[in-house]
């Protein structure tokens, strides 16, 4: 019985010292970075704060690069999304068309999603339509990027889907 108590105490100590953390990665372009706002006002940081309020202890990584294309995201996928990641929020943006990059946007997005799903990672798409709707509601900073309040609204919209993917309470 004493050995069992010692083992239980050791396991509890390890659980406190090294809590299980889920990984969330936001992969995208300037609207993932949070162009026009501080790092803390970008949607990944705001989403992390909202998840913490639900008991999430992991980190939400911001792997956005301003001006990135879907080809760029595909080429850096393995570096940006480490082993142990459970959820990726994918924001392909509109830079392929804006930059005149001869890329197969839909094909690149499909490859990214396929590779993530093969790794058992849930994918949450952050479509351009979400940004457009928020900009039309008055949350636009420059017609393309959001204000801090807009990124907060976006994080709040994404929260239920991400929480569900992590197994956290939806409300």
Image (spheres, rainbow, N blue to C red):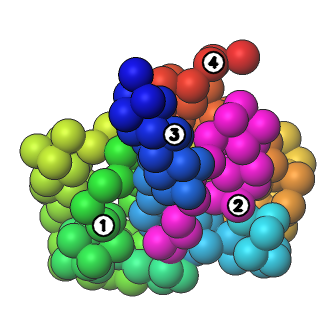
Residue 16: x percent and y percent? 58, 48
Pair 3/1: label in front = 3
Name the one closer to the observer, 92 or 44.
Answer: 44
Q: Which residue is mark 3?
A: 9
Residue 154 showing in the rendered view: no
Q: Is residue 93 above or below residue 13?
A: below
Q: Please tell me which residue is depicted at 37% across the width and 34% down the height of the picture.
A: 3
Q: Is residue 19 above or below residue 66?
A: above
Which stretch is magenta? 43-64
Distance between the Cα atoms at labels 3 and 1? Answer: 31 Å
Name the one closer to the observer, 66 or 6.
Answer: 6
Q: Which mark is residue 45?
A: 2
Distance between the Cα atoms at labels 4 and 2? Answer: 19 Å
Secondary structure beneath label 4: loop
Q: Which mark is residue 170?
A: 4
Q: Which residue is mark 1?
A: 82
The answer to which of marks 2 and 3 sits earlier in the sequence is: 3
Can you say which quadrant of the picture contains the N terminus? top left
Relative to residue 1, is residue 143 drawn left or right? Answer: right
The answer to which of marks 3 and 1 sits earlier in the sequence is: 3
Residue 46 showing in the rendered view: yes
Q: Does the residue at mark 1 contact the one at mark 2 (Cβ under 8 Å)?
A: no
Pair 1/2: label in front = 1
């Amino acid at each position: 019985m004493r050995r069992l108590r010692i083992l239980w105490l050791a396991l509890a100590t390890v659980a406190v010292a090294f809590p299980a953390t889920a990984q969330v990665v936001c992969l995208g372009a300037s609207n993932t970075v949070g162009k026009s706002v501080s790092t803390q006002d970008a949607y990944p940081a705001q989403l992390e704060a909202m998840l913490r309020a639900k008991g999430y202890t992991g980190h939400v990584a911001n792997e956005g690069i301003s001006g990135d294309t879907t080809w760029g995201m595909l080429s850096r996928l393995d570096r940006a999304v480490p082993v142990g990641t459970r959820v990726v929020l994918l924001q392909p943006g509109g830079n392929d068309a804006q930059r005149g990059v001869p890329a197969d946007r839909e094909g690149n997005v499909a490859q990214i999603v396929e590779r993530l799903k093969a790794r058992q990672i849930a994918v949450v798409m952050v479509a351009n339509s979400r940004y457009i709707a928020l900009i039309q509601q008055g949350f636009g900073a420059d017609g393309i990027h959001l204000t801090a309040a807009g990124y907060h609204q976006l994080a709040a919209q994404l929260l239920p889907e991400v929480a569900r993917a992590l197994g956290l309470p939806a409300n």
